Amino acid sequence: MFIPCSEKRGSAYFEFQYCKKEWNIKKLLRKGYSFWDKESLLVHIDNDKTFFDNYLDYLKAPESYRGAEEFDCCGVNYYTKEQTLKILEKIKVDQPKDFEVLAEWLEKAVAEYNGFYFLGI
């Protein structure tokens, strides 16, 4: 279900991208990312039902400069390092489909970066 950015064909993907900046929430959500980072992990739109059935519960409360903390499958969702660690811990316990791939990627988001973005289509 998860593929590295180097294997993408086309543009119909959801993107997990490392947050490499340490800015305030407003600036992160406006300028802290650019699509198709070489380290990103992707989910093709054809796998959206399987992905969301397995992972939506973990992604429901991103940071938002509006304070809404509502997941937007078509927009930009940011998760702090602390949120990322909680997501990682839950995924390791629950073991949803293909969790090993995402867990390994999230470990790097916690160890080396300022969390991650989930970029919608």
Image (cartoon, rainbow, N blue to C red):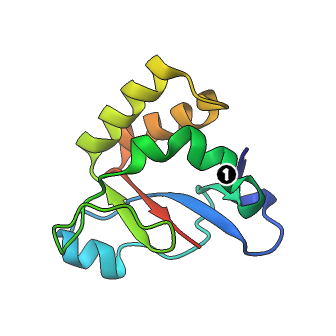
Q: Residue at x 35, y 73 (%)?
A: 32
Viewer-side residue, 59 vs 16: 59
Q: Position of residue 76 (x, y in %)?
A: 41, 71
* Disc 1: which residue: 49
Residue sitting at the far top:
93
**Could you tell me residue 29's position as x and y percent?**
31, 74
Q: In the image, is 73 to the left or to the right of 13?
A: left
Residue type highlighted by circle 1 = Lys
> Residue 72's x, y, as percent?
42, 67
At label 1, counting other C-alpha atoms closer than 10 Å, the crowd grade (few under 14, some 14-19, many 20 or more) is: few
Q: Nearer the viewer, residue 92 or 58?
A: 58
Q: Residue at x 48, y 47 (%)?
A: 56
Instruction: Quarter of the image for the C terminus: give it.
Output: bottom right
Location of residue 115 with respect to 30 vertically, above or below: above
Judged from this view, the residue extending furthest toward the right is 9
For label 1, the SS is helix
Question: Residue 82 appears in which quarter of the rendering?
Answer: top left
| Residue 117 in picture, x, y percent from top left | 42, 60
Q: Is residue 83 left or right of residue 103?
A: left
- Vertical placement of 53 versus 21: above or below? above
* Residue pictured at 39% horizontal, 26% vertical: 90
Q: Residue at x 21, y 67 (%)?
A: 68
